[in-house]
Image (cartoon, grey):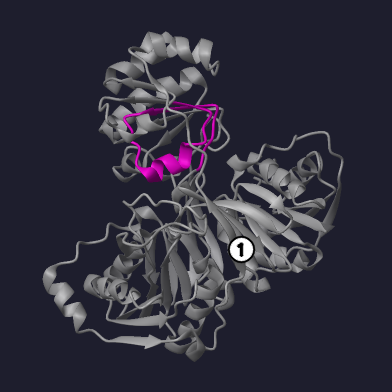
Amino acid sequence: MTALVIAEHDNASIKSATLNTVTAAVACGGDVHVLVAGQNAAEAAKAAGQIAGVAKVLHADGDSLAHGLAENLAAQVLAIAGNYSHILFPATASGKNTAPRVAAKLDVAQISDITKVDSPDTFERPIYAGNAIATVQSADATKVITVRTTGFDAAAASGGSAAVESIPAAADSGKSSFVGAEIAKSDRPELTAAKIVVSGGRALGSAEKFQEVMTPLADKLGAAIGASRAAVDAGYAPNDLQVGQTGKIVAPQLYIAAGISGAIQHLAGMKDSKVIVAINKDEEAPIFSVADYGLVADLFTAVPELTNAL
Amino acid sequence: MKALVAVKRVVDYNVKVRVKSDQTGVDIANVKMSMNPFDEIAVEEAVRLKEKGAITEIIAVSCGPTQCQETLRTAMAIGADRGILVETAEELQPLAVAKLLKALVDKEQPQIVILGKQAIDDDANQTGQMLAALADLPQATFASKVELDGDKAKVTREVDGGLETIAIGLPAVVTTDLRLNEPRYVTLPNIMKAKKKPLETVKPEDLGVDVAPRLKTLKVAEPPKRGAGIKVPDVATLVDKLKNEAKVI
């Protein structure tokens, strides 16, 4: 019984979601191999070999794998799928894009967004925006899984010494091609891996105010910035900052929600945070029902005041 | 050029579901049901493509119990031309739905299939990708912009760090993200018109698909509850609590 983890990486390094996924793979009970599929990704493959608990790294390198196109990445995984009892992807945009293609081609059910491994064939996963936790059992020969990274601790990024084996890259499917990307460059910690997240809601009123009020607080705390769906829909913050059921799922040590009312879809994305602070002028706002510390105040005075007090 | 859109009947997004006391599932008796919000965006996108002249016919498909007819009527009130209900009382999992849709794609030969990226009940985020794999089609998931150009499409996708644009050949499968469009409100005249549009019913057997569930749900439980917190009177107290009680800063 061996599990395969599909690494999330940027060719030079391994992204932290991979580390949580390795922990889930270890919990499945067998050896853990990691697939690094990319272009000029030797550095990432080397880093994957150093993850504690990894027995072997498979490195596929080629132009077809440069942009993580689902058709090519799925073909890469399928080329080696027969060797594995479990195939685990982090539940990131890339993992969610590719895993179901692999599962369908293998004619197996996919188990999405697992938060716990009960046994090699039984897993827990949230449904209905996290308002219920389902325990599901798979009878399929191969378990294709996406892993909710907040459900598992990160494996140590060093300490391992797995060998890196090169494997041939999958051919380009010709079905899709990469045109371009607008990826925000930021020195801030990644939203899903940050220890502190400060999130703003619709109450901020404009993109300028969102920047002006939330950024200094995030800078002071070394925090990632998040947003509610309402704030993103209104154009106050970019889409990749959305925290919630269908956006990013976060579980930092400290989550500060400013001007967020707390719709169940938002709570689904952050209620596993260790400490939650809510700042909202409406004392009836549902966000207060999950907040450890609630401050009923106007965020335009309270947030700058908090920034200055830190 | 045909578009096929898949629509799922789910518990309305405003309803907070309750877990049944015997832990066999969530209680959806007497709960308001609606079209999955992402599927509404899918129907709206198809209608906009038709209004631009890029598409000539929109077929809405729903898989599930008889009541899914209502979901299909809603899709037709938004602007779908006809509906197909794949009727079954069996619990349908994403792989089964993908197989049913694949059978209909083979039959109808649409140039584009648009689905919601995720249903808000099982939160699986699988069906579109599975359909693309089974039908051997290109996929563009989590779309925030779709431009059709002859036998190609350019799709902007919401990814982790921001946005990514890919080019795909048609036919293809597209799944919708929240920012793709804002679905129109259905008007009474359109609801009336939708009642007269054709709605065909087929069974999974007619399509030669075995829909037996592959995953067995052993238990559905309440998530752990967060203990009630406290209200703090001012920022100074908040900072003190975070430093000395929670010790997180």
The residue at which mark 1 appears reads as: A110
Q: Nearer the viewer, residue B110 or B219?
A: B219
- Where residue A95 sits: x, y (%)? 60, 54
Q: Is residue B101 visible?
A: yes
The image shows residue B88, relative to residue A100, as above or below, that is below
Decide if residue B73 is on the left or right side of residue B23. Answer: left
Q: Is residue B207 left or right of residue A72?
A: left
Q: Is residue A200 visible?
A: no
Q: Nearer the viewer, residue A174 or B92?
A: B92
Residue B103 in percent (x, y) is at 50, 84
Would you identify the image quadrant in which residue B51 lies? bottom left
Magenta-colored span = A249-276
Residue drawn at (85%, 48%) of the image: A55
What residue lies at 54% left-to-right and 72% top-to-bottom?
B132
Residue B65, horizontal then vertical, whole percent: 39, 76
Q: Quadrant of the N terminus of chain A?
A: bottom right
Looking at the rendered structure, the secondary structure element under dot 1 is strand
Is residue A272 covered in magenta?
yes
For residue A165, which quarter of the picture? bottom right
Residue A309 part of the magenta segment: no
Q: Chain of mark 1?
A: A
> If the image is split into quadrants, where does the C terminus of chain A sit?
top left
Callout 1: 10 Å neighbours few (<14), some, many (20+)? many
Q: Depth check: give the residue in front, B200 or B55.
A: B200
Q: Which residue is pictured at 46% across the width and 89% down the height? A: B107
Number of marks in picture: 1
Q: Residue furthest left?
A: B189
- x then y, percent, for residue A6: 69, 53
- Amino acid type assigned to the residue bearing label 1 in the image: Gln
**Left or right: A159 in relation to A244:** right
